[in-house]
């Protein structure tokens, strides 16, 4: 946003964002996720911050327009899609909402119910993707991309190279899918669902896009720029609750203590957060600490 046209409060926020960006720009701790080979090719020093208010105003600094893949930051929105199609109780029959200490890709289910613990870890996210309807794989992908298009405010596409890399290295996800299928937690279209899940994680976004997605959640499911509805207000309430409890994996408790907003990370380097009634905030930095990779 051009500082010559901003209101004083916006100018102050722009200054704060610029100062934060400058202070952290030379931070070199953390490592790029390399278990998906294509992700290891990104510039580890990229860094952007984006903020979008519920009235549509936006600010961004650094590499906020640099494309990257959404990865696990897609999970809250796909969970919301599943709730829209099957209702809260319908999804709860397949996916729990409990925080866990295990790693996000742990091959484990709730022993009492045989469900994945929550939709923010890989098992729960795969189960949520499996719930997305459509007569064919192409139909399901088109519906998925259409929802993200409404949330971002423009057409989105899959990074085919990252998708191929995800598919080639996704053995733990395949193991999770087969385990869940043995307990009836996902359908027999297992391979089709995994392909859709890998494509979902490979959607290309920017830091600004993530901030718009966060603002859409903060605005009760309505994109504050285009005014298109992405999710219903009641679904957004459920999505934000699960993000708040589980969105940062086993760091979620400390995140809540220190930051205190619903958020979701992705191994591509993006984090999306929502402040209900105010707006969305997103960061992009491919260097990840141990709790997020």
Image (cartoon, grey):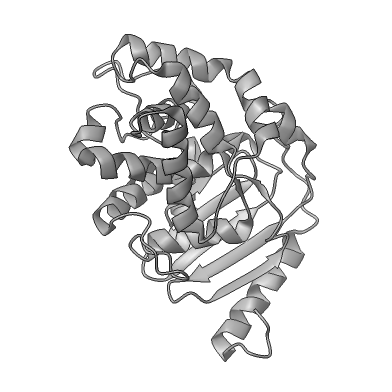
Q: Quadrant of the C terminus?
A: top right
Residue 91 in percent (x, y) is at: 26, 34
Residue 43 in percent (x, y) is at: 80, 45
> Picture quarter containing residue 19?
bottom right
Residue 216 in percent (x, y) is at: 42, 61
For residue 117, above or below residue 60: above
Q: Quadrant of the N terminus?
A: bottom right
For residue 132, above or below residue 179: below
Who is closer to the viewer here, 137 or 163? 137
| Residue at point 61%, 73% (across, down) | 59
Who is closer to the viewer here, 237 or 174? 174
> Picture quarter containing residue 123?
top left
Q: Looking at this rendering, what residue extends furthest in the left direction?
A: 89
For residue 191, above or below residue 151: above
> Picture quarter containing residue 266?
top right
Tell whether 204 sits left or right of 188: right
Residue 147 in percent (x, y) is at: 42, 50
For residue 276, above or below residue 73: below
Tell whether 137 sits left or right of 63: left
| Residue at point 37%, 40% (across, down) | 79
Q: Is residue 5 visible?
A: yes
Q: Is residue 104 visible?
A: no
Who is closer to the viewer here, 132 or 268? 132
């Amino acid at each position: 946003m051009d500082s010559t046209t901003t209101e004083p409060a916006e100018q102050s926020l722009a200054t704060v964002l610029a100062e934060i960006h400058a202070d952290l720009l030379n931070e070199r701790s953390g490592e790029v996720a390399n278990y998906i080979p294509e992700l290891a090719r990104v510039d580890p020093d990229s860094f952007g911050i984006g903020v979008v208010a519920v009235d549509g105003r936006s600010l961004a600094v650094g590499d906020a327009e640099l494309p990257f893949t959404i990865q696990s930051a897609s999970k809250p929105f796909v969970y919301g899609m599943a709730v829209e199609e099957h209702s809260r109780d319908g999804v709860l029959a397949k996916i729990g909402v409990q925080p866990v200490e295990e790693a996000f890709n742990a091959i484990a289910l709730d022993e009492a119910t045989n469900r994945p613990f929550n939709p923010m870890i890989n098992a729960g996210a795969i189960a949520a993707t499996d719930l997305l309807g459509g007569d064919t794989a192409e139909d399901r992908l088109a519906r998925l991309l259409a929802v993200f298009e409404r949330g971002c405010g423009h057409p989105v596409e899959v990074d085919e190279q990252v998708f191929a890399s995800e598919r080639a290295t996704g053995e733990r996800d395949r193991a999770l899918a087969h385990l869940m299928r043995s307990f009836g937690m996902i359908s027999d279209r297992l391979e089709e669902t995994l392909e859709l899940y890998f494509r979902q994680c490979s959607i290309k976004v920017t830091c600004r896009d993530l901030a718009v997605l966060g603002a859409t959640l903060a605005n009760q499911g309505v994109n504050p720029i285009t005014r298109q509805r992405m999710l219903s207000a009641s679904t957004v309430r459920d999505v934000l609750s699960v993000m708040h409890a589980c969105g940062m994996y086993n760091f979620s408790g400390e995140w809540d203590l220190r930051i205190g907003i619903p958020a979701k990370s992705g191994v591509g380097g993006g984090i999306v957060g929502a402040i209900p009634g105010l707006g969305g905030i997103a960061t992009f930095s491919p260097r990840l600490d141990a709790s997020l990779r």
